[in-house]
Image (tube, helix red, strand yellow):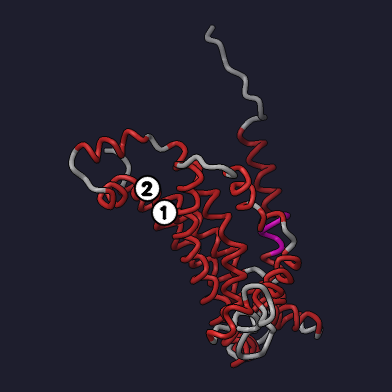
């Protein structure tokens, strides 16, 4: 009689059932509640709420700043991960720990710290103000805050892939006459592409839902520095629950479409660069 290996976890059906129950209680049911509450509005009320000029301005700032911050973090996150993996230097462990600081730091504390540093009389803002560059209480401040909180997602997603990357691949490419740019573009980038897209998606999603750090440094000026999560909070404070859920539905749908697109690109990249 062949030996049957026992699994540590219970059977597939039981674990799948608990998984679906857990996801339903924490994700599916709350999200469904948002759509149910929004359905109490008529189409005209819904459309008027989500297309108001003040709301459209908040969309442009929220999605635009989140996309730009995630793009910047895509480049600098790869650079930071590369330095942490490929080089040995004094204070490396400290730098590695500092990368995780936005994870542990309360968002309100981050917002206050960034505002104090980048205000006109702050350590950095005092040097930028004479150049005509104002960060605090401007859209640029929103971008800085979203970049700050999104960097660790890219670094921690790309870093394990770089650590597992065999240095012999680069040596082989160099021995075949490839320069550094060709080695990176044709050898390393295809391997890093899925993890880069994952880090980008995580940074974008985190930036899109950020509230605590942005609300301090943005100044919350309507039509200028007001983000959509702040409008949702404002409507909740006014007991306009249907209006708040209407804005939440728009952000949820757009975010889902963008994340689905990124996941499809990641799947395509994995398939196209997989060994035959």
Callout 1: helix, strand or loop?
helix
The residue at which mark 1 appears reads as 266
Corner quadrant of residue 166: top left
Which residue corresponds to the image point at 46% horizontal and 50% vertical from the top-left? Answer: 195
In the rendered structure, does residue 27 fall within the stretch colored magenta? yes
Rendered location of residue 28, percent (x, y): 66, 59
In the rendered structure, does residue 189 fall within the stretch colored magenta? no
- On screen, 207 above or below 80? below
Residue 89, which numbered label?
none
Which residue corresponds to the image point at 61% horizontal and 83% vertical from the top-left? Answer: 138
For the residue pair 12 and 210, the one nearer the viewer reads as 210
Instruction: Name the image quarter holding the N terminus.
Output: top right
| Residue 65 visible in the shown view | yes
- How many residues crowd mark 1 within 10 Å: few (<14), some (14–19), many (20+)? some
Callout 2: helix, strand or loop?
helix
Whether residues under marks 2 and 1 lie with C-beta atoms below 8 angstroms apart, the answer is yes
Left or right, 234 with respect to 199, comes to right
- Range of the magenta residues? 25-30
The residue at which mark 2 appears reads as 270
Rendered location of residue 225, percent (x, y): 63, 84
Rendered location of residue 58, percent (x, y): 60, 83
What predominant SS class does the magenta segment belong to?
helix
- How many residues crowd mark 2 within 10 Å: few (<14), some (14–19), many (20+)? some
For the residue pair 192 and 120, the one nearer the viewer reads as 120
| Residue 40 visible in the shown view | no
């Amino acid at each position: 009689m062949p030996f049957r290996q026992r699994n540590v976890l219970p059977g597939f059906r039981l674990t799948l059932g608990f998984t679906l129950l857990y996801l339903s209680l924490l994700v599916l049911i709350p999200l469904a509640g948002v759509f149910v509450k929004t359905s109490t509005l008529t189409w005209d009320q819904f459309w008027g709420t989500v297309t108001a000029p003040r709301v459209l301005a908040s969309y442009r700032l929220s999605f635009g700043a989140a996309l730009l911050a995630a793009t910047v973090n895509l480049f600098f996150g790869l650079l930071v991960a590369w330095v942490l993996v490929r080089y040995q230097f004094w204070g490396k462990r400290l730098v590695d720990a500092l990368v995780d600081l936005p994870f542990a730091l309360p968002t309100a504390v981050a917002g206050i710290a960034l505002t104090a540093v980048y205000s006109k009389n702050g350590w950095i803002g005092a040097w930028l103000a004479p150049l005509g560059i104002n960060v605090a209480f401007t859209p640029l401040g929103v971008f800085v805050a979203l970049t700050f909180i999104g960097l660790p997602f890219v670094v921690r997603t790309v870093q394990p892939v770089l650590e597992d990357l065999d240095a012999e691949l680069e040596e082989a490419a160099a021995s075949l006459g490839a320069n550094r740019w060709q080695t990176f573009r044709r050898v390393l980038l295809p391997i890093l592409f899925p993890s880069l897209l994952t880090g980008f998606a995580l940074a974008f999603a985190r930036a899109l839902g950020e509230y605590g750090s942005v609300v301090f440094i943005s100044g919350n000026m309507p039509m200028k520095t007001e983000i959509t999560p702040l409008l949702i909070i404002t409507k909740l404070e006014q007991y306009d629950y249907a209006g708040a859920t209407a804005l939440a539905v728009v952000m949820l749908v757009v975010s889902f479409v963008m994340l689905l697109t990124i996941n499809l690109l990641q799947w395509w990249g994995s398939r196209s660069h997989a060994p035959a």
